[in-house]
């Protein structure tokens, strides 16, 4: 038997944990409301971020940098926070079986930006998959 590729294991873990994320956010938001759900979500992020930051700075001895990539990381993080706020709000109103697949279309935006701005190339089959995913999103929204 072939040894499983570690990148494939990482993908499985992302899908698994992001699946848990949406599931638990839906239940939590329904039980404690939007404001409290947002508070607890971001408090948890803050604590975990502090632990990760401490590990990176003190144990890995990674120096701070101010290169151009920092701006992109900050803007990306701001976009993530704003998206999470809208996601939590949307979970209050939508059924989980619709909300998760519909909001999971965000990689299509990333892909379009990568093609237009970074000049990345994708195969025709990949483009067809993205278009079918968008069509599925339209059907879910009906």
Image (cartoon, rainbow, N blue to C red):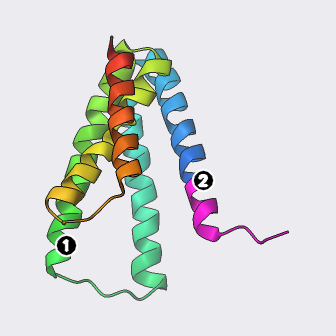
Tell me: residue 6, above or below residue 80: below
| 2 part of magenta stretch | yes
> In what element is the residue under mark 2?
helix
Instruction: Establish if 112 lies above or below 50.
Output: above
Image coords of residue 84 (percent x, y): 31, 38
Return the x and y of residue 129 as percentages of the image width and height: 40, 42
Asked if residue 21 is among those painted magenta in the image, a careful observer would answer no
Decide: is 55 above or below 24. below
Q: Nearer the viewer, residue 14 or 78?
A: 14
Q: In this view of the protein, which residue sits in the foreground, 89 or 118? A: 118
**Residue occupied by mark 1:** 70
| Quarter location, residue 82 | top left
Left or right: residue 91 versus residue 83 is right
Instruction: Count neighbours of disc 1 (C-alpha within 10 A) and say few if under 14, some if 14 to 19, many if 20 or more.
Output: few
Residue at numbered disc 2: 13
- The count of marks equals 2
Residue 12: x, y in percent? 61, 52
11 vs 44, nearest the viewer: 11
Residue visible at 41% across and 23% down in the picture = 99
Does 75 sit above or below residue 139?
Answer: below
Tell me, yes or no, if residue 36 can be seen here.
no
Q: Which residues are magenta?
A: 1-12
Q: Residue furthest front?
A: 124
Tell me if 57 is positioned left or right of 13 in this view: left
Residue that appears at 55% across and 46% down: 15
């Amino acid at each position: 038997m072939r040894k499983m590729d570690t990148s494939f294991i990482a993908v499985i873990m992302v899908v698994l944990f992001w699946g848990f994320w949406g599931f638990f956010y839906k239940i939590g938001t329904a039980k404690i409301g939007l404001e409290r759900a947002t508070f607890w979500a971001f408090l948890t992020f803050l604590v975990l971020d502090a632990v990760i930051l401490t590990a990176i700075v003190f144990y890995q001895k990674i120096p701070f940098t101010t290169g151009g990539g920092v701006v992109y990381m900050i803007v990306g993080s701001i976009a993530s926070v704003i998206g999470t706020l809208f996601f939590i709000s949307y979970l209050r109103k939508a059924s989980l079986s619709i909300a998760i697949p519909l909001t999971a279309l965000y990689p299509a935006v990333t892909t379009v930006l990568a093609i237009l701005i970074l000049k990345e190339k994708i195969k025709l089959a990949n483009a067809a998959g993205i278009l079918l995913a968008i069509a599925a999103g339209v059907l879910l929204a009906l």
